[in-house]
Image (tube, grey):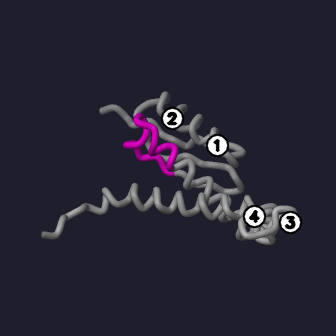
């Protein structure tokens, strides 16, 4: 008998899978997996160089930061059901969307700020209007 699972249930699973995959790849590159212990890996050197000039490494770093921030927001019981969008450019995270109140907005900014690699958080979250 086929089970009918909605796509909404798959979104967090896919997000977690992507987050774990990106984290594993990043950790392997950072630790120089496959290279001699005394020599930094070529991939890690390339990522450091391209991160500075805004190349592909920078894009990947920003994608990792975005994934980590989204994962942390999804972990938070107060914020996981809210409509919060995360965008990262040059290690600056922009939060947009709607929250219930300013307390939720401040909480989201605190969580995003605590993620490794985040230089600054721009808060563009809007409070839902009460009817």
Number of the label disc, if any, that sits on residue 32: 4
The CA distance from mark 4 to mark 2 is 38 Å
Q: Residue at x 45, y 38 (%)?
A: 76
Mark 3 or mark 2, whichever is nearer to me? 3
Q: Which residue is mark 2?
A: 105
Number of the label disc, if any, that sits on residue 51: none
Q: Nearer the viewer, residue 59 or 25?
A: 25
Secondary element under disc 4, as helix, strand or loop, is loop
| Residue segment shown in magenta | 71-85
Please tell me how crowded label 3 is: few (under 14), some (14-19), or many (20+) other residues with Cα within 10 Å. few
Number of the label disc, if any, that sits on residue 39: 3
Position of residue 15 measured from the top left corner of the image (x, y, whole percent): 45, 58
Secondary element under disc 3, as helix, strand or loop, is loop
Does the CB distance between marks 4 and 1 fall below 8 Å?
no
Task: Classify 27 as above or below 92.
Answer: below
Which of pointers 3 and 2 lies earlier in the amino acid sequence?
3
């Amino acid at each position: 008998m086929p089970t009918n699972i909605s796509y909404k249930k798959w979104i967090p699973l896919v997000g977690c899978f992507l987050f774990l995959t990106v984290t594993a790849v990043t950790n392997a590159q950072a630790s120089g997996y496959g290279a001699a212990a005394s020599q930094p890996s070529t991939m890690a050197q390339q990522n450091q160089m391209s991160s500075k000039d805004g190349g592909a490494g920078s894009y990947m770093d920003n994608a990792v930061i975005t994934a980590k921030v989204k994962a942390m927001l999804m972990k938070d019981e107060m914020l996981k059901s809210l409509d919060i969008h995360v965008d990262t450019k040059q290690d600056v995270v922009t939060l947009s969307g709607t929250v219930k109140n300013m307390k939720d907005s401040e909480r989201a900014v605190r969580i995003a700020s605590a993620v490794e690699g985040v230089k600054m958080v721009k808060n563009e979250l809007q409070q839902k209007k009460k009817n």
